[in-house]
Image (cartoon, rainbow, N blue to C red):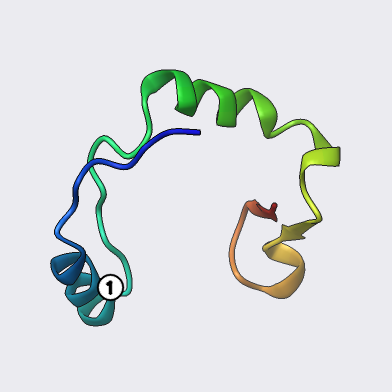
Amino acid sequence: MPILPNYDWSAVTRQLLETGYALLPNALTPVDCAGLITGYEDESAFRKTINMAQHRFGLGEYKYF
């Protein structure tokens, strides 16, 4: 499991509250990212897949671990 760099969690919290998201540079290594990309096709890794168009949320899908 990757270890997160030492972020300023107060600043991260503020950004989440102000914008709804926060950037965490270097949270994942390129190897971690590649694993997530290749693992996306493994349906057994996810509990649910959401088809956004079905719910009129736009195009695409997302999955819950």
Q: Report crowding for label 1: few under 14, some 14 to 19, many 20 or more residues within 10 A (C-alpha).
A: few
x then y, percent, for residue 2: 43, 33
| Number of numbered markers | 1
What is the three-letter code of the residue carrying label 1?
Answer: Leu
- Residue placed under numbered mark 1 in the picture: 16
Q: Which of 59 and 11 lies nearest the eye of the viewer?
A: 11
- In the image, farthest residue toward the right: 44
- What residue appears at the point 64 percent right and 23 percent down from the top-left corner? 38
x then y, percent, for residue 61: 66, 53
The relative height of residue 45 versus residue 11 in the rendered view (above or below) is above
The image quadrant that residue 64 belongs to is: bottom right
- In the image, farthest residue toward the bottom: 17
Q: Which of 23 and 59 lies nearest the eye of the viewer?
A: 23
The image quadrant that residue 13 belongs to is: bottom left
The relative height of residue 18 versus residue 37 in the rendered view (above or below) is below
x then y, percent, for residue 55: 72, 73
- Along the horizontal axis of the image, is 16 left or right of 58? left
- What residue appears at the point 36 percent right and 25 percent down from the top-left corner? 29
Secondary-structure class at tag 1: helix
Q: Which of 46 and 54 lies nearest the eye of the viewer?
A: 46
